[in-house]
């Protein structure tokens, strides 16, 4: 007896490698944007902590402030190049 259950099964879509890559990248961008929005308070708090320590005369604050800004800039530039669309 033949199996006629194929009608009820959802059809599998054929994805190319580029389609899968684009889906993964778009989902990653969405998650990154959501995480960044939820972490703004943390970034601002950390920035002001280093800012205050810099103006209090602590040399460590100066080094940490510039390291943090440089690190964010590098990550931003990498993300800009990596996620550049079209």
Image: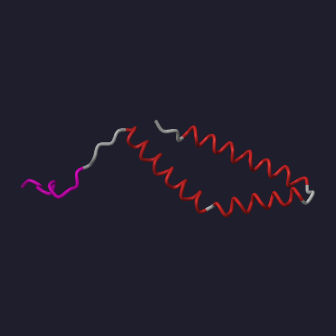
Instruction: Examine the structure image and report whether residue 74 is included in the region drawn in magenta.
Output: no
Q: How many marks?
A: 0
Taking the spot 59% from the left edge, 63% from the top edge, the residue there is 38
**Where residue 79 appears, x then y in whole percent?**
59, 43
Residue farthest to the front, as pictured: 55
Question: Image quadrant of residue 5?
Answer: bottom left
Taking the spot 69% from the left edge, 59% from the top edge, the residue there is 43
Magenta range is 1-11
**Does 15 appear above or below 42?**
above
**What colour scheme was applied to this rendering of the protein?**
secondary structure
Instruction: Examine the structure image and report whether residue 10 is included in the region drawn in magenta.
Output: yes
* Secondary structure predominantly adopted by residues drawn in magenta: loop
**Where residue 50 appears, x then y in whole percent?**
81, 57
Q: Nearer the viewer, residue 32 or 11?
A: 32
Taking the spot 74% from the left edge, 45% from the top edge, the residue there is 70
Q: Nearer the viewer, residue 59 or 17?
A: 59
Taking the spot 75% from the left edge, 50% from the top edge, the residue there is 68
Residue farthest to the right, as pictured: 57
In the image, is 24 to the left or to the right of 13?
right
Residue farthest to the left, as pictured: 1
Question: Image quadrant of residue 60?
Answer: bottom right
In the image, is 14 to the left or to the right of 51?
left
In the image, is 6 to the left or to the right of 67?
left
Quarter of the image containing the N terminus? bottom left
**Where residue 45 appears, x then y in whole percent?**
73, 63
**Where residue 63 appears, x then y in whole percent?**
84, 49
């Amino acid at each position: 007896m033949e199996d006629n259950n194929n009608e009820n099964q959802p059809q599998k879509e054929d994805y190319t490698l580029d389609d899968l890559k684009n889906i993964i990248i778009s989902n990653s961008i969405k998650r990154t944007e959501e995480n960044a929005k939820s972490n703004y308070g943390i970034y601002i708090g950390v920035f002001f902590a280093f800012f205050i320590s810099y103006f209090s005369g602590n040399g460590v604050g100066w080094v940490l402030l510039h390291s943090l800004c440089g690190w964010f800039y590098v990550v931003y530039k990498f993300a800009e190049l990596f996620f550049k669309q079209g």
